[in-house]
Image (spheres, rainbow, N blue to C red):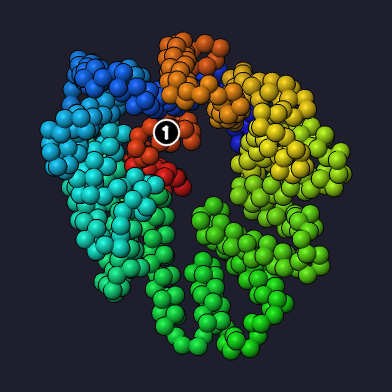
Amino acid sequence: MTELNQILKDGHITEEQYKTIESFENNRLFSIHWELRTVLYLGILLLSSGIGILVYLNIDTIGHQAILAAVGLASAACMHYIHKHKLPYTNLTSIHTSPFFDYVVLLGCLLFAVFIGYFQFQYHPFGEHYGILVFVPTIISFYLAYRFDHKGVLSIAITGLASTFGLSVTPRQLVEGNDFSDLSVIFTALLLGIILAAWAWYSDKNRIKQHFSFTYSNFALNILCIATLAALFDQDLKNVSLLALAGICVYFIKYALTQKSYLFLLLSVLYGYIGLTYIIFYLLSKVDNMSEGIFMLGMTYVIASAVGVIFLFLNIKKIVKTKCFWTFSCLLFAAACFFVLESFIKNKNIYNSGTDEALLYIGLTFLAVSVFLIVDEISSNSPLLYFSTALPFIAFAAIRYADRIATLALSFCVYAILFLVIMKLGDVAKLIMPFALILFSAVLYFQIKKFKSKAELFYWRSCIEVVEFLSLIVFYMACNYYVIRESSVAFFSMDLQIGEDIPLAFIFYILTALVPLGYIYVGLKQKDKTLLWSGLALLAASALTFKYYFSLGHPEIALTASGIVLIVVAYFSIKYFKIPKYGITFEEQVDEDSFLKTNAEALIIVESLTQKTTPLSQDGVEFGGGQSGGAGSGGSY
């Protein structure tokens, strides 16, 4: 409320307006909608993984027919439920009243795919026609996606369609899982990408599930660009590939401007930049007897492409043989980046536009390299001196430009200095290190909370939140038994045998279990999302820690039990907070800007994100809602 007090003090609102806004904010409900949905997603993931392993290990005991019958009946039960509770079909977005309906649709689709695959594996009804095997669940998935308006199932359907073409299109497998050195694979990927892009355009034009077009286009962009880049890199079709890549990037840049999607603009420019950079270096490599000049010209190109300034070095071979030159060059490039950055800020009034961030990061990178070279000349192998020298420059960048990445680097630098200073204490360090980090992180957290409440620091709010989150993480790491034990071995040469505990082990075991629970409790009580997210994430880390040291030897049982526990906790929590209690509700807040809101489904749905775009605006080009549709990541502008 400090910002509101400042607004009232400046005379922008009246006392009556202040009281109205204050009353609204004080009575505002704290939504844990996406947190509970994420827990539910994770529970489904763990449960399905555990059951899968359990079945695999006990296949001979259970019997194939029994497993097929169980999976088939479960899938049929899901299908019966969703058809019984279905809403009328519409080409618009359909939102079901039950919070579990989407999960049942997803579970039914996955179980049907498992049933078909297992049936083929055991009885081979399709023979060697594996394309038909994949095509059948793909068609079912498309039907379920359109009939029940489920973009997660749509991502599965598109993945299945790609498999019928012989391609892997999940984010992790798109490059690794396809042999793009084979020209036929490239042509197949191009054909699939064109089909997806064409259908996205057609459905968008004819208003057929317009919110699905983002998912199709996201797959299409990544498939088309990676295929053309592969042709550019590995085939003798460089001119054609470059033209094709340019056409694809231009088309999707236009799409990004139309849909107001920063994600598509970013990806299109990035893919185009990669292709252009490759061609430039490819042409430079054809020049004879200029190996050193090629490197410097390439570096010049990178700077010029980022900051819009072209540096041309002449007679580079004669001067590039000393470390002094490299130090001077890095300092020169850093100065150029910061000069252009300041000019842009002063004349263009830009902030977080992408251009200023690129200039800042490139400038800091060159500055860091120059500091390293200078420190290495003074005292080699002195990380403490390096971090101490870099600290004021990073601090200036974080404060001057209110940048989160620079703030993260600053926090890392501070923690590194603290760690290295304590390390110089010798044997005492191994005793006080975790407690020093705990104490420092606690003091930093409470101090940063005070800064966060100051109205005059409003423009640094995002930076303050970065430090706040990092202090919570480091506090936990300094309490985590695994981190302490392994650090004792790695940094303090402590000789520990397998199964042997460190001194005061019981304290760190207790802290490992209680700290995340404390974060969650305080986060709910104080309605603090940072504490809540940290607690949920670190609770998983604690579970893995105890699993590592106290394994039951049966991962399938641990996964299944964990999944059941998470599903039960999520289910009863959703039921309990369906009606708001203690100021907490399960109902989604429509104006909530949540990371989980755009990324939770990535935990379960074929490594694909499935969110929607923001509706179009009629006033100029305003980017927003650049979220993924299955083959990329989310982002907003």
**Which quadrant does the N terminus fall into?**
top right
x 81%, y 45%: residue: 423
x 76%, y 56%: residue: 383
| Residue 515 spot, x, y in % from top left | 66, 24
Judge left or right: residue 6 versus residue 140: right
Q: Is residue 215 above or below residue 252?
A: above
| Residue 82 spot, x, y in % from top left | 23, 19
Q: Is residue 329 visible?
A: yes
Which of the 4 quarters of the picture holds residue 589?
top left
x 33%, y 68%: residue: 234
Which of the 4 quarters of the picture holds residue 604?
top left
Q: Is residue 290 above or below residue 225?
A: below
Judge left or right: residue 94 versus residue 486: left
Q: Is residue 381 above or below residue 425?
A: below
| Residue 389 spot, x, y in % from top left | 78, 59
Neighbourhood count class around disc 1 (C-alpha, 10 Å): few under 14, some 14–19, many 20 upward: some
Q: Is residue 588 above or below residue 220?
A: above
Q: Secondary structure at mark 1?
A: helix
Viewer-closest of 453 and 140:
140
Viewer-closest of 147 and 104:
104
x 46%, y 88%: residue: 288
- Which residue does the numbered mark 1 point to in the structure image? 603
Type of residue at label 1? Leu
